[in-house]
């Protein structure tokens, strides 16, 4: 498998994003192979030291929204890092193209583009909510679905920005006390989210009304986390805030616990009542929330 092919494809896709919808199976296989090779070397808790961040919530196959977000990142040279908070696949109509485009971007700018794993980047979920059907409709060999999921299982599950002191994750914190060092010791390549801590990082939700934790309606082994758990986690790990995704609020974002947690959602195709949002977070942690359509206008005011 030559890496050159994946790099050539990446360049081609980034010149014309729609090309990500037109790839042949062999092209997709070479992107996946390259990404798996790159991800294998990365820890489960990724760290970045400095720079501004554009944080993107669930995309869920909304290719048009993804194209807007990526064009903002490519045009605005003041954005140092682009962080996808997971749930790129399922529900919407173009999951495969969305992954292709993000993989192409990671290949081109591996130090600036970060894809944190969501609960839909797990085979137990994406075999049921659209992605498996999309692969079948695409007419690919069955193992392409498995190859995507092998790659997803190598994704980082959290990212820490050391200057901002922000913890980026898809769902949130586990209910058992957890240090950042512990996250790196969790098993990599956990396809089905069998590890309970990984499962909770990807599935748990914040809830304002509780202090510690409560059982979640999402299912067994999933919890709501409250203010005291958040404060304890932040203090122990010398952090100030959690930025996560995973919940579709109608405004596209919501703050919890006196702004100690921010939730962002960035998909509209499947969710007609949602106004997608992205969060621009400067190096010091100052946050501006935008709809991707309003981004350029808001910056020129
Ligand atoms: Mn989710």
Image (cartoon, rainbow, N blue to C red):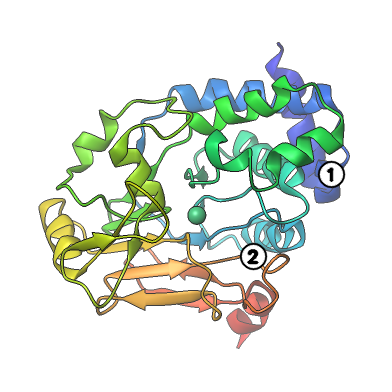
Mark 1 or mark 2, earlier in chain: 1
Whether residue 7 is situated above or below residue 11 in the rendered picture: above
Q: In the image, what residue occupies the spot 42% across and 37% down?
A: 156
Question: Gap between marks 1 and 2, in whole Å?
Answer: 18 Å
How far from the left and from the top, in percent, is residue 182? 20, 35
How far from the left and from the top, in percent, is residue 17? 80, 49
How far from the left and from the top, in percent, is residue 98? 71, 47
Badge number at residue 272: none
Secondary structure under tag 1 reads helix
Badge number at residue 21: 1
Q: Farthest top residue?
A: 1
Whether residue 17 is situated above or below residue 278 in the rendered picture: above
**Front position among marks 1 and 2:** 2
Q: Residues within 10 Å of mark 2 (few under 14, many from 20)?
A: many
Nearer to the camera, 54 or 50: 54
Q: If the image is split into quadrants, where does the C terminus sit?
A: bottom right
Residue 275 visible from this viewpoint: yes
Q: In the image, what residue occupies the spot 65% across and 72% down?
A: 292
Q: Is residue 296 left or right of residue 252?
A: right
Badge number at residue 267: 2
Query: How many numbered marks have been drawn onto this rendered protein structure?
Result: 2
Q: If the image is split into quadrants, where does the N terminus sit?
A: top right
Residue 82 visible from this viewpoint: no
Whether residue 195 is situated above or below residue 176 in the rendered picture: above
Q: Farthest bottom residue?
A: 301
Within 8 Å: ligand 1 and the Cβ of disc 2?
no
How far from the left and from the top, in percent, is residue 295? 63, 76
Q: In the image, what residue occupies the spot 44% across and 60% down?
A: 52
Nearer to the camera, 202 or 82: 202
Whether residue 10 is situated above or below residue 266 in the rendered picture: above
């Amino acid at each position: 498998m030559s890496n050159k092919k994946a790099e050539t494809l990446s360049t081609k896709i980034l010149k014309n994003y729609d090309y990500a919808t037109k790839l042949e199976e062999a092209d997709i296989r070479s992107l996946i192979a390259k990404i798996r090779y790159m991800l294998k070397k990365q820890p489960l808790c990724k760290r970045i030291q400095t720079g501004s961040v554009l944080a993107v919530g669930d995309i869920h196959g909304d290719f048009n929204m993804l194209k807007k977000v990526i064009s903002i990142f490519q045009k605005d040279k003041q954005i140092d890092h682009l962080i996808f908070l997971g749930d790129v696949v399922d529900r919407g109509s173009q999951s495969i193209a969305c992954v292709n485009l993000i993989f192409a971007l990671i290949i081109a700018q591996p130090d600036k583009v970060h894809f944190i794993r969501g609960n839909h980047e797990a085979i137990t979920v994406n075999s049921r909510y659209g992605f498996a059907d999309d692969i079948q409709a695409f007419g690919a060999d069955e193992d392409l679905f498995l190859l995507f999921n092998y790659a997803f299982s190598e994704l980082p599950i959290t990212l820490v920005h050391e200057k901002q002191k922000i913890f980026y994750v898809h769902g949130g914190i586990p209910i058992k006390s957890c240090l950042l060092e512990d996250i790196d010791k969790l098993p990599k390549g956990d396809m089905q989210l069998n590890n309970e801590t990984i499962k909770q990082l990807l599935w748990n939700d914040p809830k304002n009304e509780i202090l510690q934790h409560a059982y979640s309606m999402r299912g067994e082994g999933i919890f709501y986390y409250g203010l005291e758990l958040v404060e304890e986690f932040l203090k122990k790990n010398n952090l100030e805030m959690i930025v996560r995704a995973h919940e579709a609020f109608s405004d596209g974002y919501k703050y919890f616990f006196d702004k100690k947690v921010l939730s962002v959602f960035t998909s509209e195709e499947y969710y007609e009542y949602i106004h997608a949002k992205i969060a621009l977070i400067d190096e010091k942690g100052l946050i501006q929330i935008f709809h991707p359509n309003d981004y350029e206008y808001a910056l020129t005011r």
